[in-house]
Amino acid sequence: MALDQIELNLLREIADLHQIPEGAYNIRLNGESAGRNSTENITIEPKTDKPGINIYIKPGTKNEACHIPVMLSQSGITEVVYNDFFIGEDADVTIVAGCGIHNCGTDLTEHDGVHTFHVGKNAHVRYVEKHYGEGDGLAENVLNPTTVVEIEEGGRMEMETTQIKGVDSTIRETTARLADGASIEIKEKIMTHGRQVATTNFTVDLDGEGSSANVVSRSVARDESRQKFVSCIRGNNVCTGHSECDAIIMDNASVSASPDLDANNVEASLIHEAAIGKIAGDQIIKLRTLGLTEEEAEEQIIAGFLK
């Protein structure tokens, strides 16, 4: 498999890879599979009924990674892809996903990815998903990720999602159900500019005794862009849940945050926090005394905020 310079740049942006990775991987390019490799412990198989793949991780697998990047370098492609992950009991793995779009045509390009995770007992998954778009601005880049998570007893999932450039419209849907002693930690970073629109919906059901959830979103809205954050944590047993949304608003942008908590058990302990505001003037002044321009100071503050 040979990738051109545009495709290699997309791969670097969404997966921090400078070449085809070692180990287990599936690379999807312009609506088709461009390369796939399984290992002794991680098996990747194409679906037979719809676009997408099944990823099977053997019980007890430790310290292995699976890369499944998607790249669209042709204008006008629209697709829905379904990927299912079956993580065996006691496994400890990292899964790196994400989608990059290079659109220099005049037609809308869209990738909708539906990822379903079945996390076995006492398994640990770190899931990293990056979205990135680039082009000449003549056509829209659209990315709509859906993530469905089911975590069995004692399982744990860390989910890191990032979108900071080039996506004109996104609706991000994440739902999770947790069994006894299971936990999930979600960290989201988003930046919008121009007239971009981003909507995030998190719904977590803490069904198991001793289950826990921590949902944190940090975002920056610039220019005329719009953002909406909705988070619902339902405590259905003895559990703990925390939801936090921090946003910086600039120019003529708008941000809406709607944290929602449903306690359905007297022993459910749930907390939510939401803060939206502009960059503090004293931060700008402090950095300008160090020789930075106002624009450079803003970029430094934003970079630190989204780090």
Image: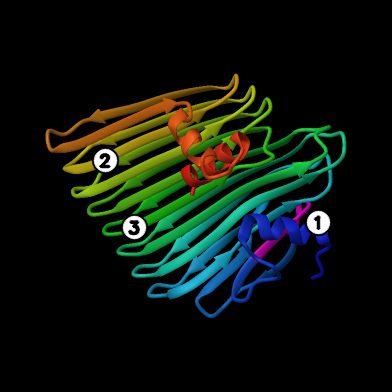
**How is colour applied across the structure in the image?**
rainbow
Q: Would you call the spot at circle 3 few (<14 residues within 10 Å), some (14-19), or many (20 or more)? A: many
Q: Marks 1 and 2: which is nearer the front?
A: 1
In the rendered image, which residue does mark 1 sit on? 6
Disc 2 marks which amino acid? Gly
Is residue 35 toward the left or the right of residue 55 in the image?
A: right
The x and y percentages for residue 265 are 16, 34
In this orientation, does residue 125 appear?
yes
Is residue 262 toward the left or the right of residue 24 in the image?
A: left
Is residue 144 toward the left or the right of residue 56 in the image?
A: right
In the rendered image, which residue does mark 2 sit on? 241
Q: Which residues are magenta?
A: 26-33
The residue located at (57%, 60%) in the rendering is 54
Work out how far the residue at label 3 is from the one at label 1, CA to CA, in angstroms: 36 Å
Could you say which is closer to the camera, residue 207 or residue 27?
27
Q: Would you call the spot at circle 1 few (<14 residues within 10 Å), some (14-19), or many (20 or more)? A: some
Q: Is residue 297 above or below residue 183?
A: above
Work out how far the residue at label 1 is from the one at label 2, CA to CA, in angstroms: 42 Å
Q: Would you call the spot at circle 2 few (<14 residues within 10 Å), some (14-19), or many (20 or more)? A: many
Quadrant containing the N terminus in the rendered view: bottom right
Please say if the residues under marks 3 and 1 sit with CB atoms less than 8 Å apart.
Answer: no
In the rendered image, which residue does mark 3 sit on? 156
